[in-house]
């Protein structure tokens, strides 16, 4: 099962890369700070009534238009359309302590049964009296529990200049009213100098599992096409990026779906 998930996730990460390459995303800018926000949903054919298993992919790319180092990213908030639902009923959970100081391989060995997504990060490492150089690594998302509440742990592991791991905690809440239902929010620690400046973050949430003999999915969705229409255009996700210098950039991804079988 884990191998099948990793193969599927690799394909979804390729899809995210295609979005970035062809520019299927939103661009938001304040002063010299610019964020590119891409993403998508798979499959795009969904039921009008009821729900089907889906994967949601989002990716943010941070740059400074004047060539300087961008301010450090302090928090990320992702709101998902109200027609999407998150369900962790019966899904194994991972604890924060199981991921601390763990490599990617160790995290998978310890918490592989609780995995719900994956992605990557890129950063610019700035060391004294040296030219900046790129760094990066994998991100693994796990269904977790913290202080009695369900969360999503994002395990970040990089090997340059030294092997290091971080665990970001995405707390989620459900919104009532409006166009969005699930909101995931994480605060980034004040990273050490060797972690540099985060330039790109990508994450795909997807997980199929069984509970009490029934097939379930971590994320499900329907197509909000009104009666008489087979296609709908809707705001898939809204992302907010808050930075060390106080600036906050928010961007909305608009996508389309079609009614399955129509």
Image (spheres, helix red, strand yellow):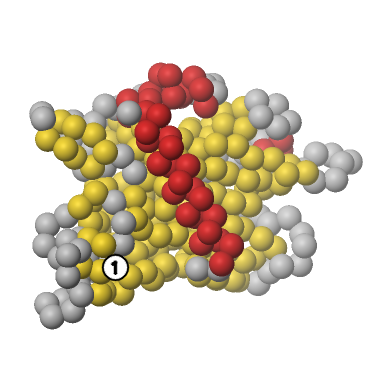
Q: Residue furthest front?
A: 261
Q: In the drawing, does residue 128 fall left or right of residue 39?
A: right
Q: How many marks?
A: 1
Q: Nearer the viewer, residue 252 or 190?
A: 252
What residue is at 18 percent from the left and 32 percent from the top?
210
What residue is at 77 percent from the left and 59 percent from the top?
68
Which residue in the protein does label 1 denote?
257
Q: Nearer the viewer, residue 217 or 69?
A: 217
**SS under mark 1:** strand
- Percent across and percent down for residue 223 are 22, 65
Q: Nearer the viewer, residue 39 or 187?
A: 39
- Percent across and percent down for residue 172 are 31, 46
Residue 134 in which image quadrant: top right
Image height of 25 relative to 77, above or below: below
Q: Is residue 242 visible?
A: no
- Percent across and percent down for residue 98 are 42, 20
What residue is at 66 percent from the left and 55 percent from the top?
71
How crowded pointer 1 is (Cα within 10 Å; few <14, some 14-19, many 20+) is rated as: many
Q: Quadrant of the N terminus?
A: top left
Image height of 170 relative to 95, above or below: below
Q: Residue furthest right?
A: 129
Image height of 146 relative to 249, above or below: above
Q: Is residue 228 visible?
A: yes
Q: Nearer the viewer, residue 238 or 146?
A: 238
Q: Quadrant of the C terminus?
A: bottom left
- Percent across and percent down for residue 92 are 26, 27
What residue is at 49 percent from the left and 48 percent from the top?
13
Q: In the drawing, does residue 220 fall left or right of residue 164?
A: left
């Amino acid at each position: 099962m884990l191998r099948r998930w990793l193969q599927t996730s690799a394909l979804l990460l390729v899809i995210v890369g295609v979005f970035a390459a062809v520019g299927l995303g939103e661009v938001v800018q304040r002063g010299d700070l610019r964020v590119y926000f891409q993403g998508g949903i798979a499959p795009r054919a969904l039921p009008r009534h009821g729900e089907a298993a889906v994967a949601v992919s989002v990716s943010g790319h941070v740059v400074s238009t004047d060539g300087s180092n961008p301010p450090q990213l302090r928090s990320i908030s992702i709101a998902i359309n109200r027609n999407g639902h998150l369900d962790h009923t019966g899904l194994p959970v991972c604890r924060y302590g199981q991921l601390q100081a763990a490599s990617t391989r160790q995290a998978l060995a310890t918490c592989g049964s609780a995995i719900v997504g994956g992605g990557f990060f890129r950063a610019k490492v700035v060391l004294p009296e040296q030219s900046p150089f790129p760094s990066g690594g994998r991100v693994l998302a796990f269904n977790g529990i913290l202080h009695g509440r369900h969360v999503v742990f994002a395990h970040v592991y990089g090997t340059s200049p030294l092997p290091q791991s971080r665990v970001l905690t995405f707390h989620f809440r459900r919104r009532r009213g409006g166009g969005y239902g699930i909101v995931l929010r994480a605060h980034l620690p004040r990273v050490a100098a060797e972690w540099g400046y985060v330039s790109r973050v990508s994450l795909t949430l997807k997980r199929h599992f069984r509970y009490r003999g029934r097939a379930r999915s971590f994320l499900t969705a329907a197509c909000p096409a009104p009666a008489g229409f087979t296609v709908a255009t809707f705001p898939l996700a809204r992302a907010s990026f808050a930075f060390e210098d106080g600036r906050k950039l928010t961007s909305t991804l608009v996508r389309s779906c079609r009614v399955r079988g129509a």
